[in-house]
């Protein structure tokens, strides 16, 4: 539901193209490898592979891809870990 709302909001911008989506961290990394997006919106809490670990792996392989961390929670340790993994503040 949150993903659908985010996609709906992003589609309202003419200069943003949504090229893919994933339901877990492993799927996200596979899609990133295939699609090579410029920006990834990564949820911190995902099944199979969490967003922090997925971001760390993404940035080690594709340092040029910008990552925006997303969380429904505001735990400072998770936010700090996401930034340390390579997401933008």
Image (cartoon, grey):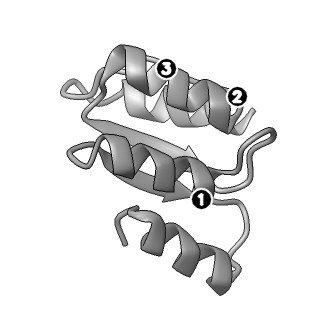
Give SS at disc 1. Answer: helix
Q: Quarter of the image containing the N terminus? A: top right
Which residue position holds label 1? 52
Give SS at disc 2. Answer: loop
Q: Position of residue 79 (x, y in %)?
A: 57, 75
Give SS at disc 3. Answer: helix
Of 34 and 76, which appears nearest the observer? 34
Q: Identify whether 13 is placed above or below 80.
A: above
Q: Residue furthest right?
A: 47
In the image, which disc is placed on residue 33? Answer: none
Which residue position holds label 3? 31
Which residue position holds label 2? 23
Please indicate, yes or no, whether residue 4 appears anywhere in the rendered image: no
Report the number of numbered marks: 3
Of 85 and 8, which appears nearest the observer? 85
Separation of marks 3 and 2 at Cα, in angstroms: 11 Å
Separation of marks 3 and 1 at Cα, in angstroms: 17 Å
The residue at the point 37 percent across, 72 percent down is 89
């Amino acid at each position: 539901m949150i993903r659908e709302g985010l996609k709906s909001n992003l589609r309202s911008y003419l200069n943003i193209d949504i090229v893919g989506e994933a339901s877990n961290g492993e799927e996200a990394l596979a899609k990133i490898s295939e699609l090579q997006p410029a920006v990834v919106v990564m949820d911190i809490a995902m099944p199979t592979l969490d967003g922090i670990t997925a971001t760390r792996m993404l940035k080690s392989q594709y340092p040029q891809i910008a990552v925006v961390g997303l969380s429904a929670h505001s735990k400072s340790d998770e936010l700090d870990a996401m930034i340390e993994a390579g997401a933008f503040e």
